[in-house]
Image (cartoon, rainbow, N blue to C red):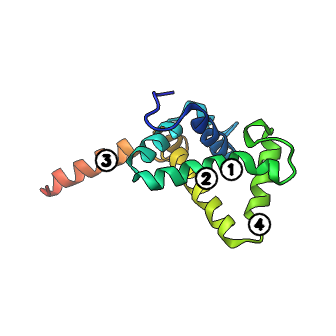
Amino acid sequence: MAELQVLSGREASIFACITDTVVAPEPLLPPVRDTDAVAFFDDWMRRLPGLNRAAMRALLWAAELTPLLMGFGRRLRRLDRERRREWLSGVEHFPIAQTRLILKLLVSAAQLAYYGNDAVMLRLGYDAAANKSRGDELRLAEGRP
């Protein structure tokens, strides 16, 4: 993993665990550890205003600890994949709308970080480099800048 800029090692681990839970990549797609998802999230966090960064950190820690409060008996990173999915489903159906919206923020960040990885996109059939090359050739052929 690339050197972290603003996340602690534990926060990076929490985000990787959330991402693994959300995208459940294996066996068809590469595991989160083999992508730049955590590095992407770390860089995104670096660019956030300080207050927003602190709030996102708090959300990561809340995600880590809520399984304890929900009766799962362990923190998120200590649960196996199936129990983490049960936790995620429980929070997605939580009766307080704001809780569901906060979870959507973390889920969206995890999906963006994972599915934005070039190797993952290529595995899904999207070749950004080839598309750019075709676009460059078309602009050149049409005489556009």
Marks 4,3: beta carbons within 8 A? no
Task: Indicate the amino acid at tag 2.
Answer: Leu
Q: Where is residue 129, by image quadrant?
A: top left
Task: Indicate the amino acid at tag 3.
Answer: Lys
Q: Is residue 117 visible?
A: no
Residue 77: x, y in percent? 73, 38
Task: Indicate the amino acid at tag 1.
Answer: Ala
Marks 4,1: beta carbons within 8 A? no
Judging by the rendered image, the residue that carries numbered circle 2 is 59
Left or right of 43 on screen, residue 7:
right
Residue 99: x, y in percent? 68, 65
Q: Which mark is residue 132?
A: 3
Residue 79: x, y in percent? 80, 39
* Of the pair 130 and 88, the residue shown nearer to us: 88
Left or right of 112 on screen, residue 71:
right
Judging by the rendered image, the residue that carries numbered circle 1 is 63
Q: Could you give the CA–CA distance between mark 4 and mark 3, rounded to whole angstroms?
A: 43 Å
Is 69 located above or below residue 130 in the figure? below
Q: Could you give the CA–CA distance between mark 4 and mark 2, rounded to whole angstroms?
A: 16 Å
Q: Could you give the CA–CA distance between mark 2 and mark 1, rounded to whole angstroms?
A: 6 Å
Q: Which mark is residue 113?
A: none
* Of the pair 106 and 49, the residue shown nearer to us: 49
User: Which of marks 1 and 4 precedes in the sequence?
Assistant: 1
* Of the pair 27 and 41, the residue shown nearer to us: 41
Q: Is residue 41 visible?
A: yes
Marks 2,1: beta carbons within 8 A? yes
Q: Which mark is residue 94?
A: 4
1 or 3: mark nearer the eye: 1
Say what secondary structure mark 3 lies in.
helix
Left or right of 8 on screen, residue 65:
right
Residue 142: x, y in percent? 16, 57
